Image: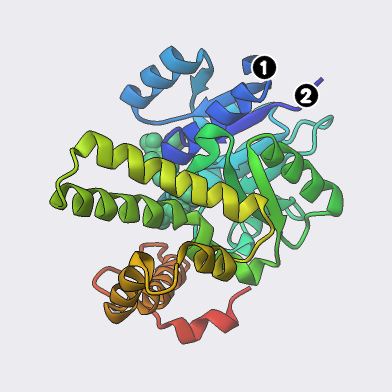
């Protein structure tokens, strides 16, 4: 019998996990979702035929409780999770998908010694192509990590990292799909500017990014060499790359990903509210995190 998984928060990433687990063959009777929005509840029931309820009911009898809520909702939800009596036959494992917040934040509220595993997934989980990173908290054993890795391997690839690397992971693969979609938007708009129809430009951009991704992950050739293979001497690609670099393409990624980490650091601040307007802690705080 598979262990029951409770997903707390049926938003974007909670739904991606739910859809991926169902597609990978996990029976819906072993899945339950807690979602507070009535509208979302109805959508999830209709789309997946899964039981959707409140936090306490979902956690009752679940072996794995996955938190897929915003950082600002964490303290209230974890207090509710902690209040549900542990079933003597099932040791409850808490898995958090929440950006920024360290495992000790959960460990401090949950019953003493409760295992917590932190995960940073991404939305390609919707098509079984997630990239997830997993980091154990203080009380999580190798077996707990193996359980979470097994769960996530059914919806994509998984790496295990130290918790202090989770903000960098968030900046790269957690948010990364958004950078790829932004690049697609830019390529499509530029293609339309050059006279392509939007439909053709969208197909060209999507399949190009997909093909490049498959080449990068499957060929074992470095991105530098893959790019060199496209860049003919005195050709068109060299001209385009010269323009991208002149316009700060690489620098933009360094700065964007540092800002991403700074946002994670802000989220972990005592009141759990992200600081807007760039006034949060600087990235020099990163090395102090664990
Ligand atoms: N969207 C993404 O690509 C990724 C998100 N994450 C993390 O996942 C978490 C959720 O993000 P999204 O899914 O994008 O947000 P979202 O806003 O789409 O989903 C959060 C859901 O939680 C529900 N919720 C809030 N309080 C609740 C409560 N007390 N009981 C039941 N449900 C409750 C909300 O109604 C909402 O549907 C965040 O902490 C984020 O850092 C991590 C990796 C990728
Ligand atoms: O934007 C966010 O905060 C979340 C974390 C990684 C992707 N989405």
Name the quadrant of the N terminus: top right
Q: Does 262 appear above or below 37?
A: below
Q: Is mark 2 within 8 Å of ligand 1?
A: no
Q: Is residue 271 left or right of residue 103?
A: left
**Residue that carries the numbered disc 1 in the rendered image:** 27
Q: Give the left or right position of residue 190, taking residue 284 as reference.
A: left
Residue drawn at x 42%, y 49% is 70
Q: Nearer the viewer, residue 218 or 13?
A: 218
Nearest to the observer: residue 209 or residue 17: 209
Kind of element beneath mark 2: loop
Determine which quarter of the picture holds residue 7. Answer: top right
Q: Is residue 148 left or right of residue 23?
A: right
* Residue 229 position (above or below residue 91): below
* Image coordinates for residue 174, horizontal then vertical, percent: 50, 55
Estimate how packed mark 1 is, as few (under 14), some (14 to 19) or many (20 or more) residues with alpha carbons within 10 Å.
Answer: few
Asked if residue 8 shows in the view, the reply is no
Q: Which mark is residue 213?
A: none
Q: Label 2 crowding class (10 Å Cα cut-off): few <14, some 14-19, many 20+?
A: few
Q: Residue furthest front?
A: 234
Viewer can see residue 257: yes
Tell me where residue 50 appears, x and y as whole percent.
Answer: 53, 17
Report the quarter where the C terminus lies.
bottom right
Residue topped by disc 2: 2
**Which residue is painted at 50% across and 34% down in the image?**
126
Mark 1 and mark 2: Cα distance apart in space: 9 Å
What is the x, y in percent for residue 266? 41, 70
Disc with the residue nearer the chain's start (1 vs 2): 2
- Residue at the spot x=58%, y=24% of the render? 32
Quarter of the displayed picture in which ligand 2 can be seen? bottom left
Which of the 4 quarters of the picture holds residue 10? top left
Give coordinates of residue 220: x percent, y percent.
69, 58
Assess whether mark 2 and mark 1 are in contact (beta carbons under 8 angstroms): yes
């Amino acid at each position: 019998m598979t262990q029951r998984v409770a997903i707390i928060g049926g938003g974007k990433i909670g739904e991606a996990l739910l859809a991926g687990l169902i597609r990978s063959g996990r029976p819906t009777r072993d899945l339950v979702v807690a979602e507070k929005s009535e509208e979302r509840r109805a959508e999830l029931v209709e789309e997946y035929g899964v039981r959707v309820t409140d936090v306490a009911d979902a956690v009752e009898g679940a072996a794995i409780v996955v938190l897929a809520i915003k950082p600002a909702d964490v303290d209230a939800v974890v207090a509710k999770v902690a209040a549900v009596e542990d079933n003597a036959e099932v040791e409850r494992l808490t898995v958090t998908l929440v950006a920024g917040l360290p495992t000790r934040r959960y460990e401090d509220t949950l019953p003493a010694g409760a295992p917590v595993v932190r995960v940073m997934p991404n939305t390609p989980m919707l098509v079984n192509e997630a990239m997830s990173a997993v980091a154990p908290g203080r009380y999580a054993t190798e077996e707990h990590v193996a359980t979470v890795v097994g769960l996530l391997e059914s919806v994509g690839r998984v790496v295990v990292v130290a918790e202090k690397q989770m903000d960098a992971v968030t900046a790269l693969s957690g948010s990364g799909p958004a950078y790829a979609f932004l690049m697609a938007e830019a390529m499509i708009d530029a293609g339309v500017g050059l006279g392509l129809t939007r439909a053709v430009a969208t197909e060209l951009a999507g399949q190009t990014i997909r093909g490049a991704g498959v080449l990068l992950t499957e060929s074992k050739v470095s991105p530098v060499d893959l790019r060199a293979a496209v860049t003919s001497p005195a050709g068109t690609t060299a001209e385009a790359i010269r323009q991208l670099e002149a316009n700060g393409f690489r620098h933009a990624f360094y700065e964007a990903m540092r800002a991403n980490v700074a946002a994670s650091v802000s989220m972990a601040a005592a009141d759990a509210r992200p600081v807007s307007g760039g006034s949060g802690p600087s990235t020099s705080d990163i090395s102090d995190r664990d």
